[in-house]
Amino acid sequence: MKIATHVDEKLLKDAMKATRARTKRDVIEQGLRSLLPTRKHREFAKRLGEFKVSWTHDELMRSRE
């Protein structure tokens, strides 16, 4: 899909360097793809709620074995 928009040129260039994207399209797609999992994780955590964990770090590591 084609879209015409204004993007800060320095921001775009910096993002292209950081991601090693070859094209502007690539860097925009990478940014959008990375946004979705982050948002989904936040929504999942919100639904899960908060709870206190009484395990120590060592107990947690042993439970994973």
Image (spheres, helix red, strand yellow):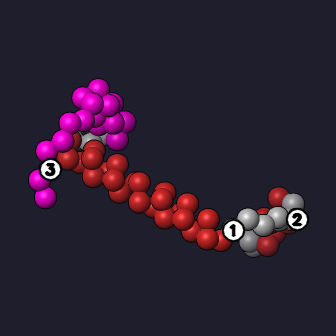
Q: Is residue 3 magenta?
A: yes
Q: Compared to 38, does 12 lie above or below?
A: above
Q: Which residues are magenta?
A: 1-19
- N-terminal of the pair, mark 3 or mark 1, is 3
Q: Which residue is mark 1?
A: 49
Q: Which residue is mark 2?
A: 54
Give residue 51's position: percent from left, percent from top. 78, 67
Front-most of residues 55 and 47:
47
Q: CA distance from mark 2 to mark 3?
A: 50 Å
Taking the spot 83% from the left edge, 65% from the top edge, the residue there is 53
* Image quarter in which the N terminus is found: bottom left
- Residue 58 visible to the viewer: no
Q: CA distance from mark 1 to mark 2?
A: 16 Å
Q: Compared to 34, does 18 lie above or below?
A: above
Taking the spot 86% from the left edge, 65% from the top edge, the residue there is 55
Q: CA distance from mark 3 to mark 1?
A: 38 Å
Could you tell me the amino acid type at mark 3?
Ile
Give residue 34's position: percent from left, percent from top. 40, 54
Q: Which mark is residue 3?
A: 3
Secondary structure beneath dot 1 equals: loop
Could you tell me the amino acid type at mark 1?
Gly
